Amino acid sequence: MSTGAVGRAYPRLEGPAKVTGTARYAVEYPVDGVTYGWAVQAAVVRGRITRIDTTQALASPGVLAVVHHGNAPRIAPGQQPELRLLQEPTVHHRGQYVAVVVATSLEAAREGARLVRIDYDTGPHSTVLTDDHPGLYKPDQVNPSYPTDTAEGDFDAGYAAAPVRVDVTYRTPAYHNNPMEPHATTAQWHDGRLLVHDSTQGATPVRATLAELFGLPPESIRVVAEHVGGGFGSKGYAKASVVLAALAARHVDRPVKLALTRQQLFGPVGYRTPTIQRVRLAADTDGRLTAICHDAISQTSTIREFAEQTAVYTRSMYAAPHRRTTHRVTRLDVPTPFWMRAPGECPGAYALESALDELAIAVGIDPVELRIRNDTDVDPDQGRPFTSRNLVACLREGAQRFGWAGRDPSPRSRRDGRWLIGTGVAGSSYPARARPSSATATARSDGTFLVQINATDIGTGARTAIWQVAADALGVPPERVEIRIGDSALPAAALAGGSMGTASWSWAVIRAAQALREKLRDGGPTGEVTAEADTTEEVGGQPALPRYAYGAHFVEVRVDADTGEVRLNRMLGVFAAGRVVNPTTARSQLIGGMTMGLSMALHEEGLLDERYGDWVNHDLATYHITGCADVEAIEAYWLDERDDELNPAGVKGIGEIGIVGAAAAVANAVHHATGVRIRELPIRLDKLIGVSDLA
C-alpha cells in the first residue's frame, strides 16, 4: 500500500544539521594528529622544473614536509593523466599542482608554500581558441560517446535552395563551476588502507580511481561524502585534492586535510570550454525548417582530450530533412576542461535557440509559433519516436502563464521612461538517463526500515527524494524509514551527475524494497531481514529509445537606454520532466539552473591572459555571477507528465534542464528590447552601448 510520499513537498532531511552547523563536510571531520596541506602551483605555462628549493619552507615553523616530484610516493598511470600528480617535472599548463606543503597548521602550510622556490625551463605556448587554429582536429567521438559528426540528406543543396536563410556565429567564454564548498579532502592511512572524506559527486568512482593510482584493491579504500557543498559537474570524478591529500598523508604518515582555495579552483579542476559555434538554418516561407547545420569548435588540453558535445543538442531538438553537425577541437596549453552543468546542451542551446530567434524575425513568424511548427514526434537523429515529448505543451503553457499573446514583434517597441522593454523565449531539452546502481533494504525488529545506497547529495535534496521513494516502495510512512548515503562502504551507485541520480538510485531502491517485501511476505526469518538489488542487467537491457525532458523559458528584460544596464523584470520556466518526487527541492533545482543561465547571459566570463595562460579573474570578486538585483521575479512550473518507458519511479531528472536555453531566452529578450543582437556572451553594457545608440 502506497503512503503517497512521492509528490509531497517534504523539507530536506539534513536541513536542521546544515543550519545548525552539525553537518560535516570533507575537511570538518575531527581527526587525531591531523596535519594540513597547501598546494603549490606552477608559475609558467609550459616547461620543465629544473630545481625546487625547499630550504626556506622547511625551516619555517610548523612545516613538516614539501612533497614534490622528487620525493612523492609513486603512483601508477591512470585513465585521467592530470591526476598523476607530483610524478614528473613536466609542466603542462600554468596553475598545475607541482608540490604540496604539509604543516601542523593551515597558516603554517600556507606560509611554507609561499617560501618554496621553483626554477623552470620554459617553451613557447598556445592558449587561445580561434576558428582558424592550425591545431584544429576531428576527435574520434565527443562526450560521453556520441559520434563526432552527423549528416542526413544534403545540407548544402537544401540550404542553397531555401527562400529564407540564417548564417550566424556565436561565441561563449570559459565558465567556472565555483561550488560553495571547494574541492577538499581529509586523507588518512592505516595499515595500508586509505580512508578519505572527499567533496565529490560520486564516492564509488573516486574509490575506483584511487585504487588504480595507488595499486590497491578497492576494498582497501573507503570514500565518505556524506555532505557535499555543490559540484555543478566539477566533482564528477576524482580530482586533484583527493590525490594530493592521499600522497601527502602517505609521505608524512599522518592524516592530512587539504582544501583548495577559490583561486586554485579556476582551471586545474575543470571548467566549461569556450566555444565558437556557427549555426546555419534554412526554412520555407511558412517557417518550416528545411536545413540545419551546427558546427562547434572547442578546446582541450595537451594532457587529455575532452571534447564537449556542443552540437548534440541540435541533432534531436527540431526536425528538418537536411541536417549536419560537426565538432572540432584544439589542443592548447591549458588545463583540461571538464563537465559543467548540462555540458554540451547548455552552450549548444544558446546558439541554436538564438539562431531560431533570428530565423523567426527573418521569416516574420512569432518565435513561439516557429518552434511549434518545427516540433516532431520522431527523433531526427535516431529516427525513432520519443518515449514522450511535451515541448509544445511547455511552450503553450509558458506562453499562457507569461502573457505572450499580443506581443509586438518589433524591436524597441516598448519603453517605460529610460527603460527599453523586451521579451524573449527559448526551448530546452536534456536527455533522461539512468545508470546501474545497487541498494539494500532492511526491516528491523522495531518496525523501522533502513535503506542504504552510495548515492551522493550535493545539495540537490537527493537524500530526501530517495527517502520518499523508499517509503512508497516499502508501503510504510516515511517516518519509519532511515536513509544512509554518501559512503563507498555502502552498495555501489551511479554518481550525482547527468541528471540521472534520482532516476538511477530510485530504481535500485524500489527493487530492493520489492525484494524485501517478498521476503517478508514469504515469512522470512524473524528479527532483522535484509534484501538487496542490483539494477545492472535491468538498466543495461533497456531499449535504446530517445528519452528527453523538455522545457520552455520566457524572459522579460528592461535595458537602460543611457547606460545599457540589463535587468530582468521576470523569468519563467515551464518543464516536462516526468514525475516530480519532491516539489520543494524540484523547484529549487529548476530555479537554480535558470539562475545559472541568467548569470551566463549577463555576467560570467573567464578572462584568459594569453601571455600567462591563466584566468585573471580567478575569484568571486572578479568572476561576476548573477545576484538578486538582476531579476525581480523568477518562477518554475512543470507539467504533470507520465512516461512508462523511463524507470520504475517515472522520473527524468531536473538538475540540468533549467540551465539549457536560459541564456538564449535572455539574449533574445535583450534583442527585442534594443534591436541589438549580441552573439558573444556575456551581454555586458559596453557591448550594447558600443553597438548602437540606445537613447
Image (cartoon, rainbow, N blue to C red):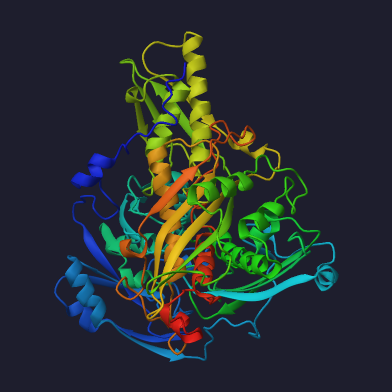
Q: Nearer the viewer, residue 190 or 347?
A: 347
Instruction: Determine the residue located farthest toward the left in the rendered image.
Output: 61
**Along the viewing direction, whichever of 644 and 168 lies nearer the viewer:** 168
Residue 36 in view (yes/no): yes
Q: Is residue 456 visible?
A: no
- Identify which residue, 590 or 525, lies in the foreground: 590
Q: Residue 280: horizontal and vertical position, in percent? A: 71, 71
4 w.r.t. 218: above or below? above
Rendered residue at 65%/75% (across/down): 168
**Residue 292 location in percent, x, y?**
74, 65
Q: Is residue 673 left or right of residue 38?
A: right
Q: Position of residue 102 (x, y in %)?
A: 25, 68
Quarter of the rendering occupied by the C terminus: bottom left
- Residue 78 drawn at (x, y percent): 53, 62
Please say if 145 is above or below 686: above
Residue at 45% across, 21% down? 474
Number of disc labels? 0
Left or right of residue 225, residue 380 in this image: right
Relative to the observer, which residue lies in front, 312 or 661? 661
Image height of 349 relative to 462, above or below: below
Q: Quadrant of residue 59?
A: bottom left
Compared with 481, 263 (above or below) is below
